[in-house]
Amino acid sequence: MLTLRERAGGQMPGQEDETRLERAQAIGLLRYMLIREAADPTLSRRQRGALVRELASMTHVDPDGRAVRITR
């Protein structure tokens, strides 16, 4: 895993940049967590579609604690 310095191209980011990077990473992890099961290559198209529709019908909590909905 890259350090903040490496992700910022060798320069140490300011507090605002660090916060933005951490939030972006948390959002990315949330998104991956939501889709990882649907990305299973052993699922049929029908199974994957049902799973994605189910995920889209639910309310999820983002890293900031807000309720969010995702689209298919």
Image (tube, rainbow, N blue to C red):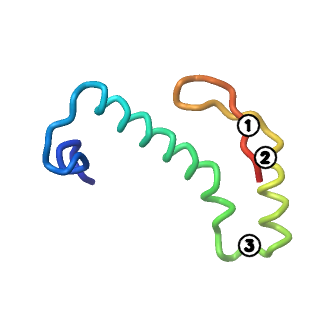
Q: In the displayed structure, does residue 8 sit left or right of residue 45?
A: left
Say above or below: 15 vs 40.
Answer: above
Give the amino acid type for the residue marked by disc 2 in the picture.
Ala
Query: Where is residue 25 shown, x and y percent of the image?
Result: 42, 42
Q: Where's the C terminus, which quadrant?
A: bottom right
Q: How many neighbours does mark 2 have within 10 angstroms: few (below 14), some (14-19), or many (20 or more)?
A: some
Q: Are marks 2 and 3 in contact (CB under 8 Å)?
A: no
Q: Nearer the viewer, residue 28 or 11?
A: 11
How many numbered callouts?
3
Tag 2 residue: 56
Among the 4 quarters of the image, the one containing residue 61: top right
Give the amino acid type for the residue marked by disc 3 in the picture.
Leu
Q: How many neighbours does mark 1 have within 10 angstroms: few (below 14), some (14-19), or many (20 or more)?
A: few
Numbered circle sitting on residue 43: 3
Q: Are marks 1 and 2 in contact (CB under 8 Å)?
A: yes
**SS of the residue under disc 1:** strand
